[in-house]
Image: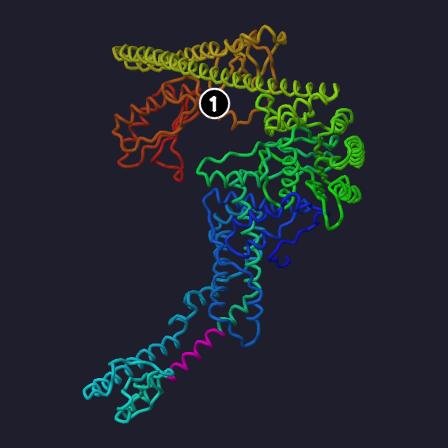
Amino acid sequence: MSSPDFIPKIPSPLAETSSIALEWPRLREHIASRTFSPLGRTWVLALEPSGDLAWINSQQQRTEEMRGLFSAGVSFDFHGLFEPTDLLDKARIEGSALDPLEILSLVTVVERIVAWINLIFPSTSASQTQMQAATPGITQLSALLREQDLVPLLRQLHGKIEPDGSLSDDASPELHRIRRAIDRQHRAIEESLRRSLRRLSEDGSTRDELITIRGDRFVIPVRAEFKRKVPGVVHGSSSSGQTVFVEPLETIEQNNELVRLLDEEQSEIHRILVAMTRALSANAPAIHSGAAILAEAEAHAARARFAAELNCVRPVFSSSPEPALSLTAARHPLLELRMVAQARAEGVVASSPIPLTIALASDARQLIISGPNTGGKTVSLKTIGLVTLMAQAGVPVPALEARLPIFTGIYADIGDAQSIERNLSSFSAHVVNLDRISREATSSSLVLLDELGSATDPEEGAALAVAVAQYFLRMRAWCCITTHLTSLKVYAATNPGVLNAAVGFDQETLTPTYQLRLGVPGASAGLNIAARLGLDPAIIASARAQLSTQTADIAAFLDQLHDQLTATAAERETLKQREQEIARAKMQLDLEGRAEQRARTRELETKLSALLDSFAVQLRDSVKAIGDKAAAKRIQRDSALALARARREFSSEFQSTIATHVASTAAGASRGTSPAPAVVKTAEPGDMVKLKSLGRQGRIERVIDSKTFEVSVGPMKMRVSLDDISEIEKGRAVTPLEAARKRGGVTVSTTEDPDYISSEINVIGRTADEAQDEVARFVDRAFLAGLPRIRIVHGTGMGILRRTLREYLRSHPHVATITEPPQNQGGQGATEVELRQ
């Protein structure tokens, strides 16, 4: 993998971008303003559109991932980044020492690189997997840093240089020792000089009792007339000459020692700077690569902030053989930014530009936009062009949806290109530009022509405009043209592969609506706009009188057509709102009806369960009254089986009745139009069948007889006759595991969750009577639910629960066998029970 660069390498750059006409540099400047370092800003300002789909998708993907990180609350500090190439080259010189502030700036870059590595490649494998899944593009961008370990370098350099460029005392143990010695020497010299000052001040030899410094040596001020009374070295005098600065003899050696320590300090500082420089030089490749990666990362961060601010989306690129140019609710980004800034300055809520929606297919690549002046035709052209530049430069676009081809060139002839220096009139400048575009454009180019055929004789201009449009149509270039010329509108209406479009105009307010309407031409409304702008009514009336009948009729027809389209759009919107209101009301009624139905069903289920429970209690009381214990035991077992059978049949019939009632409303309306059901002659277990009474699909569980079957519909089981089956779909063989799972379904609804019943109960901590009651209820529910076996956890303890429950289960009518599980599955602490079927 090659080393990254500090500015983007644009693969397959476009042959032409018309960046000045489409204001691409201005937009780049806006995006660059969202960076925090000169490194990221430089990267953004060098961004250009590319014709390489892989590069474009990579850029869009990374920006989208960065936007996702910001949305998730992740932040990163890009401050302090700069291009370190010059300093790293200087550091590579043998024996060189960078200045402390230069080293400090490189340390800041290293800190940012280490922080980025920790963000993208977290220490834990789970976090790293999660980050790679969320940011595959950014992870790939940062792959060079995965094996780089700059932590030792950061540990060596961090905190050693103060913000002012001085080395901290902890830069090395030797520096710490020297500075402590310097401090002690300072105090010794000051104490010695104070003693001299006190002695001299008694006879008035000194002016002030202060200590000063001259030439790195501590001295005291002495009156000039007393300088011979103070033995020592004179280091200068005041500007008035009345004071001399003397270094007393007793401090000369102390000052000499101080100077030696200061020299030693400077030597140690130089040694430390050389060592720091050498360490930076040894890690120069990693620092260079890391800074370049962070440059692109910050560029993606700036694009992500821009995209979030303008609600941009990632464009989709359509390729051959069916490319398409489709923009849904696209907005001109510079216009929206200006509106946001203006609203912020005025302290009001910002509004958005009127969105633009266009759709060009591979077989219709040319769009003719007409309509009034100041109606937004040129803005539409610029929006299409600038959005395309953004998309191919890896910047999300301000739209709800964008689908674009890959263009190899974008050619725009917009605005007045006259040049006095080149002796070109407006028309001449346009023709020169058209000539260049016609020579360079291809079928994969986007051509944007504003006011084609203007600035000359209308008839000749119209003929030239139609000829130019036909030329690009034959070339199959993607082409958008704005015009006021009727001949171009007619050309668009009569030639396949060309679409008309109109910017809207409100006839009542005489103002443009800025909305682009596809499929119809637009009226120029020049006289209406002139009237709105206040031109003399007499001039307007005279101008209307000059119009030919054909021109007036065309204008009136277009006005009426746009009025009808506006009314139709309003009616369609009203109808859509009414449909939504009806759907919401229907859903509300349906929810209320279902809630009421569920409540009634629960009430009936409760009553049924209570009735059967009451019957069971009465039955047990009757059995207890029988004197013969053997007979009583036999009757109890037989009655329990009969009661369970009754519960199951009552529940099945009850659920069948409820399901039939629920389905009758939905199925009743469709029975009249549905085709006659096929006659079913037989069915087998596992077949999927459709029931006439329910209008739902179920599965054949077992064949009761040739005319009766047990069918499961969701959690319900019921008996149905052959006549109730309208359709049949042969099922595959059911595995034993699936059969066991199927038998675990609930067949009787109780007040508990009907969709699930556990196959295990835990009675540890209960008394013997409490445990027996709970197990009795649990066995009944499991038996009714059709579970083949259950597990009872009672623990070991004193063995009382185990003996009581097993003795009870051996005589239970629903129990087939009881066994003790292996030691690794509970042993004596659990009992496994197989139920009768």
Residue 229's spot in the image, x, y percent? 25, 93
Position of residue 121 relative to residue 534, above or below, is below
445 is within the stretch colored magenta? no
How many marks overall?
1
Q: In the drawing, does residue 177 fall left or right of residue 564?
A: left
Q: Which corner quadrant holds the C terminus?
A: top left
Question: What range of the chain is rendered magenta?
Answer: 259-274
- Residue 63: name its quadrant: top right
268 is within the stretch colored magenta? yes
Q: In the drawing, does residue 755 fall left or right of residue 557?
A: left
Nearer to us in this view, 689 or 165: 165
Position of residue 30 relative to residue 159, above or below, is above
Residue appearing at x 54%, y 40% in the figure: 338
Which residue in the protein does label 1 denote?
743
Residue appearing at x 55%, y 52% in the figure: 297
Residue type, mark 1 in image: Arg
